[in-house]
Amino acid sequence: MQTLRVELGSRAYPIHIGRGLLGRADLLAQFITGSRTAVVSNTTVAPLYLEPLVAGLTACGLDVVRIILPDGETYKNWGTLNLIYDQLLAARCDRQTTIIALGGGVIGDLAGFAAASYQRGVPYLQVPTTLLAQVDSSVGGKTAINHPGGKNMIGAFYQPIAVVADVNTLATLPDRELRAGLAEVIKHGLLTDLEFFEWIEANIDQLLARDTEALTHAVHRSCAIKAQIVALDERETGTRALLNLGHTFGHAIETAMGYGVWLHGEAVAAGIAMAADLSRRLGILSEADLRRVISVLERAGLPVSAPAIALPRFIELISVDKKAAAGRVRFVLLEGLGSAIVRGDVPQDALVGTLGAAG
Ligand code: NAD
Ligand code: GLY
């Protein structure tokens, strides 16, 4: 097992990464101060992983409430969040109850927001079971639900008390979901770490073949990069915005297509390609580096252009991005591989060029 820390002062927490960690209920139980825990999962993940985890927690002396939600991005909404509150209340869960999120990013975001708001806040643990959740969404404390008007528009910054990522769970992940997770791995390399990006280029086939060592390295390095950025800027007043590379375009694609039609990671992949294209148009990224970005995404089996979305609608959706400030959309762009910046002064013709080329 490898352990990293997200250094956030009194809210610092560990990220444990390794094989077979779901069998180590003690890793979770040590953080649970009350006698109860509520495990939030879904109809796909629960049959695979819930009962062994419950058995371990019970053996640690904990009373476990099971909350099983419908599966899918379309359920990351107010109605499903209410199902969590309903079941917490029905089981008379109090403020000493610790929530455990067992699943991918949808479960992590929903359960995290429930934890942030139930009785004004109860502790929660992240147990991510998708590659995307292990390399990204389980770390950093962003919790949210979607709104018909925009992705992740309702939510809270609320840190977990620990993250336990068992890479063995990735064995049952559908191929399409594995590839979607690789989009966020590639994003992390592009942001700050050329060496990691080059490692991804060299190891993409091993990652797609689910080589455990390669996957563990990808999870570890991604979490280290994300933890460092989150520690600098927990509430995204500056540096953390870099973690949104590809997301301004990606969130617009997800909203335009209808939640769940494109996977989040697929939309981010197209968004990264578009951010790189925009960077090239602005003259800050070379054609050769743009080609390398596109190539690694393509080799991961990910989309590198957006679906057809009418230009005015695309621009409208981009303008509701959470990074917008004083009416200006801020884009995460690439100055090179491993070097990202945020710019709020993108000329409309360059943006239209990228959106036009994509559609
Ligand atoms: P997901 O949670 O929908 O999981 C993908 C699919 O895989 C689901 O059908 C799920 O049930 C299934 N699954 C999960 N684990 C499995 C396993 N081990 N074996 C087999 N099937 C399994 O999607 P995701 O890609 O994990 O997460 C995407 C969500 O994460 C989006 O809503 C996105 O907005 C959010 N996100 C949040 C952050 C953050 O910082 N909070 C960061 C990135 C993404
Ligand atoms: N996924 C972006 C962030 O956590 O800030």
Image: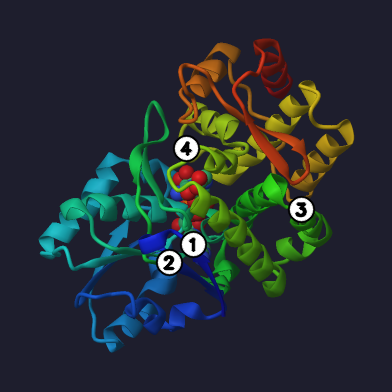
Q: Amino acid at mark 4?
A: Thr
Q: Secondary structure at mark 2?
A: strand
Write down the residue under mark 2: 13
Marks 1 and 4, Cα distance to the nearest angstrom?
18 Å
Label ID, residue 197: 3
Marks 4 and 2, Cα distance to the nearest angstrom?
21 Å
Residue at 74% from the left image edge and 33% from the top image edge: 276
Circles 1 and 2, Cβ within 8 Å, touching? The answer is yes
Characterize the local packing of mark 1: few (<14), some (14-19) or many (20 or more) Cα atoms within 10 angstroms: many
Circles 1 and 3, Cβ within 8 Å, touching? The answer is no
Q: Amino acid at mark 3?
A: Phe
**Numbered disc in front, either 4 or 3:** 4
Write down the residue under mark 1: 6
Quarter location, residue 340: top right
Write down the residue under mark 4: 237
Q: Amino acid at mark 2?
A: Tyr
